[in-house]
Amino acid sequence: MTRVDPSLLSPDGFANRPTAIVIGAGLGGLSAAMRLGAKGYRVEVIDKLDMPGGRGSSITEGGHRFDLGPTIVTVPQVFRELWDACGRNFDDDVDLRPLDPFYEIRFQDGSSFKATGSTEQMRAEVARLSPEDVAGYDKFLQDSYKRYVFGFEDLGRRPLHKLWDLVKVLPTFGMLRADRSVYAHAATRVKDERLRMALSFHPLFIGGDPFNVTSMYILVSHLEKEYGVHYAMGGVAAIAKGMADVIEDQGGTLTFHQEVSEVLVKNGRAAGVKLASGRVVPADIVVSNADAGHTYSHLIKQPKKRWTQKRLDKSRWSMGLFVWYFGTKGTKDMWPDLGHHTILNGPRYEGLVRDIFINGTLSDDMSLYVHRPTVTDPSAAPEGDDTFYVLSPVPHLGVDNPVDWDVECERYRKKVAAELEKHLMPGFEDKITASRIFTPYDFRDRYLSPHGSGFSIEPRILQSAWFRPHNVSEELPGLYLVGAGTHPGAGLPGVVSSAEVLGKLVPDAVKVPAE
């Protein structure tokens, strides 16, 4: 593995290096900047927010740190490999803590399911709910492993921008029944509806409809069980800070409070960016970690061949998110059975998902994802207090009659509060001392996400792999894309892997000796 010799970071050795601009300091953009820095580029990362992390950034109110986006880390080796490529040790910079259990799912009938890394414990959980489904669960795990090897370790970590790359793997897609949905595949293995939900909901973590997303995504079940679920002390924002530190140590720079308005073109190639302030930043290559839809609809002004506005309008986008962040006073010892991650499953599964993704309607019922980081990380709140993050999937703004969140926000919050009061946290509202809500409007305005979608383009089979926006732009030479909206997709492992793919596409800026 080649790494940049530190002596080359001297002014004399650095000034004449090829330059790279990275648009957006999300986890994908930061990973890309680290990869490019390791390849010898002079990198500048530009972001409209005030800190690194993008959707993985945080805000603090009244001593409560609210992790705004992703809350768990799976497949930590993608981070360790990224740090290693830069000559660094991830575990020196980030304190990861394994969680056990990973999360608990609570059902309307009062039953529950706890996910752990132990196969025997998981089989016991299955047997507790439905003894006749244990054998089917064992088969499901085997299915998950096969799809992990093919879908993540193979396809997910290499370029897929050439049609022939897709054609070569079509037989494997067929053999693995990629045409079947995640839920449909779970239904072939287990009969209990609670278990079907527990084995199929994972696509919601990356913006996909479990009843329509390809069954390749059952690979997440293997990822969880094999590599565990972790929490970064200080939240994902602590990982982002560690990444920013590596970039600066490489000689790169991070510029905040600046929005890119255009990718500049010279001689038919990307040649830099123009900022909303009017500043022009030339570069030899440009990497966009902005949403792929935003990149093609707003940042590239020239006519597009593939990613036209018409095509983007016809694309299916991931759901929107209603996220309520709040802090509570003196509740450390309250609700002792409420762990770090809890999924409160609503009375409907398929019907609710259909309302969100297909009908585009805001339902009266809901399923909630509850994050209580203070169980693991007391620094998220003042001593003795708690910090919470409650997420409800909702329709995005691109439907025929989008939700008017200026009108519905407080009404919907009260519905969420009623569910929490009834099922999880009696008396919690009287303890609230800090509160903030994000709706799809915030995702649209803060993250420039088309339709306020939570995870960019939905990962359906014809919007995945070669069909997804490529890591090397087919519209403009010299432009590359990373992040949730491009290959291989959303989720922390996906966006970090998109930068790994980028590293295989971009040539080294300088030749340096191997260690």
Image (spheres, rainbow, N blue to C red):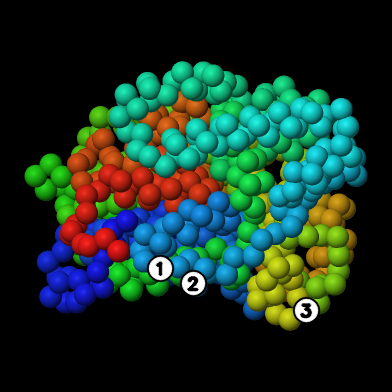
Q: Are marks 2 and 1 in contact (CB under 8 Å)?
A: yes
Sequence-wise, the earlier of marks 1 and 3 is 1
Residue 95 in picture, x, y percent from top left: 57, 70
Q: Position of residue 380 (x, y in %)?
A: 65, 73
In front: label 3 or label 2 = 2
Q: Quadrant of residue 179?
A: top right
The residue to which callout 1 is attached is: 88
Image spot of residue 82 (x, y percent): 41, 58
Mark 2: secondary structure: helix
Would you call the spot at circle 2 few (<14 residues within 10 Å), some (14-19), or many (20 or more)? some
Give the amino acid at mark 3. Answer: Gly
Mark 3 lies on residue: 384
- Nearer-N-terminus badge (2/1): 1
Q: What residue is shown at x 60% (from left), y 45% (from top)?
A: 223
In this rendering, the label closer to the viewer, 1 or 3: 1
Q: Quadrant of the N terminus?
A: bottom left
Q: Nearer the viewer, mark 2 or mark 1?
A: 1
- Badge 2 amino acid: Asp
